[in-house]
Image (cartoon, grey):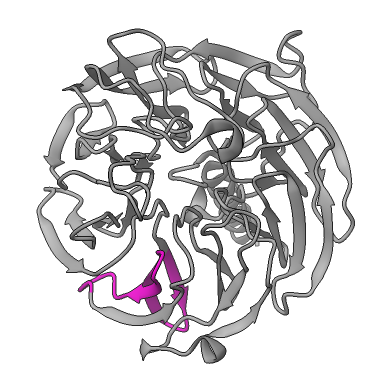
């Protein structure tokens, strides 16, 4: 009996340790399974004071300009950036009426860098220059030349660095391989001279790196061998430029890659690249949000015009071209975000529009639970919401992180100012919220 009890307690300890270890990882855009939800136990603070250093573990300056999110594996944080030789790069915030749709005037030599930071202390462990040159295309005035978030499996780090290529590094930042994907020419559909720069992030699936490259000509989804960089498959399709990251969807013993593009929403076989199904969505352009898994459904949003797009709840697992009336479990007529990806948390879909209207919907039925402006002072949201411990964290372009209680009643718990714009989606690792501002990386922990 004593030995059995000892073995049982050991197993419980291993399970507990495994859960704690998993909670430290935020390995890709929007974290575990790209869900935006931190694994338990994770309890970031609700309130903090950056200026007064309350609940601030550390803050460090990050050179250059990048909207890529931080990722975390174990005790290390990884970020990418693009440093212009001309000095600081400027952005414009707000909607198109304020920021415009022009390209930024910074076609000078840039150095793309990958940095590793110690999570406990904020110390920069290494800072690798991985590519240098004039960007192969322009960026939008709100964007950056490093808007794609890297991904890691704990042995490899993969990153799309602007339109300069797909790179793979070991965990010490040593380059393993590089793939040239061609010029990722994305911008205004009706006028290709408006170049806005890519933002879709790579996804690691088993031994493959999945990339969605929707551009003006020769769009494709492709898979590359994670160990060697060799192209495993490439599926061409006719598409508008888009900025969405592909999603891995597992349902009923079948795994699919789901992509959100301007003409079609599609499902692909991740092993072969074969297109499994498609749903027409040709009323839209400028798709940015990533598809999100909600139980047996996939939530798809986004497209122009901002604020006027529907939310789709799609049943994956189909075949061929599917009529929307059969594919949708439910849909809303309005309320979808233009830029940020929705969050699915404890059976509720949270969608924050770019002008700060937070809608909550029943994930199974689509019934609207509430619709509420996050704050009277909140006017711009490009980052996607993330969640942990019954709370939702929303980072605004004005430089505030709003903390909202998750549930069926809207409750704003706190407003936490950072003093500079927030364009990148935060990361959560254990009890730490990691926030990237325009110029800094800040660890928030009580």
Closer to us: 24 or 411: 411
**Which quadrant, please, contains the C terminus?**
top right
Please provide percent x and percent y for residue 431: 66, 33
Name above or below for residue 256 compared with residue 127: below
- Majority secondary structure of the magenta segment? strand
**Which quadrant, please, contains the N terminus?**
bottom right
Closer to us: 124 or 348: 348
Q: Does residue 73 appear in this view? A: no
Closer to us: 405 or 138: 138
Please provide percent x and percent y for residue 443: 60, 22
Residue 272 lies in the magenta-colored region: yes
From which residue to which does the magenta span run? 248-273
Question: In the image, is 153 to the left or to the right of 141?
Answer: left
Residue 303 lies in the magenta-colored region: no
Name above or below for residue 177 compared with residue 191: above
Q: Quadrant of residue 421?
A: top right
Q: Does residue 384 appear in this view? A: yes
How many numbered circles does the render carry? 0
Please provide percent x and percent y for residue 281: 46, 74
Q: Quadrant of residue 83?
A: top left
Please provide percent x and percent y for residue 298: 54, 72
Question: In the image, is 122 to the left or to the right of 103?
Answer: right
Residue at horizontal 19 percent and vertical 27 percent from the top = 174
Residue at horizontal 59 percent and vertical 45 percent from the top = 384
Residue at horizontal 60 percent and vertical 53 percent from the top = 306
Residue at horizontal 30 percent and vertical 57 percent from the top = 214
Question: In the image, is 418 to the left or to the right of 285?
Answer: right
């Amino acid at each position: 009996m004593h030995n059995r009890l000892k073995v049982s307690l050991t197993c419980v300890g291993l399970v507990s340790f495994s859960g704690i270890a998993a909670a430290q990882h935020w390995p890709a855009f929007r974290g575990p399974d790209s869900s935006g939800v931190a694994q338990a136990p994770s309890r970031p603070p609700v309130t903090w004071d950056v200026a007064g250093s309350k609940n601030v573990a550390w803050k460090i300056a990050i050179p250059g300009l990048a909207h890529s999110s931080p990722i975390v594996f174990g005790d290390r944080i990884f970020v990418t950036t693009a440093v212009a030789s001309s000095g600081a790069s400027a952005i414009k915030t707000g909607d198109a009426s304020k920021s415009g749709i022009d390209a930024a005037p910074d076609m000078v030599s840039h150095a793309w860098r990958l940095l590793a930071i110690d999570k406990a202390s904020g110390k920069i462990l290494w800072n690798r220059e991985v590519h240098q040159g004039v960007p192969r295309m322009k960026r939008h005035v709100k964007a950056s030349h490093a808007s794609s978030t890297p991904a890691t499996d704990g042995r490899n780090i993969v990153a799309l660095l602007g339109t300069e290529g797909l790179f793979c590094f070991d965990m010490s930042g040593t380059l393993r391989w590089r793939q040239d994907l061609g010029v990722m020419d994305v911008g205004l559909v009706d006028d290709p001279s408006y170049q806005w720069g890519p933002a879709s992030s790579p996804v690691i699936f088993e031994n493959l790196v999945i990339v969605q490259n929707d551009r003006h000509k020769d769009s494709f989804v492709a898979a590359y061998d994670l160990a060697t960089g060799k192209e495993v498959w490439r599926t061409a399709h006719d598409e508008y430029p888009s900025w969405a990251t592909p999603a891995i969807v597992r349902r009923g013993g079948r795994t699919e890659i789901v992509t959100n593009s301007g003409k079609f929403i599609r499902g692909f076989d991740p092993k072969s690249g074969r297109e499994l199904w498609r749903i027409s969505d040709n009323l839209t352009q400028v798709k940015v949000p990533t598809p999100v898994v909600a139980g047996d459904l996939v939530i798809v949003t986004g497209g122009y015009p901002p604020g006027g797009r529907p939310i789709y709840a799609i049943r994956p697992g189909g075949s061929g071209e599917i009529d929307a009336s059969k594919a949708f479990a439910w849909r809303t007529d309005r309320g979808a975000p233009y830029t940020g990806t929705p969050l699915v948390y404890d059976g509720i879909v949270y969608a924050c529009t770019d002008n700060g209207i937070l809608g909550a919907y029943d994930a199974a039925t689509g019934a609207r639970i509430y619709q509420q402006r996050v704050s009277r002072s909140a006017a711009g949201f490009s980052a996607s919401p993330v969640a942990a411990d019954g709370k939702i964290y929303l980072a605004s372009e004005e430089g505030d992180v709003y903390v909202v209680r998750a549930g069926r009643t809207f409750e704003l718990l706190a407003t936490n100012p950072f003093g500079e714009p927030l364009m990148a989606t935060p990361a959560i690792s254990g009890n730490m919220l990691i926030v990237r501002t325009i110029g800094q990386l800040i660890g928030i922990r009580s």
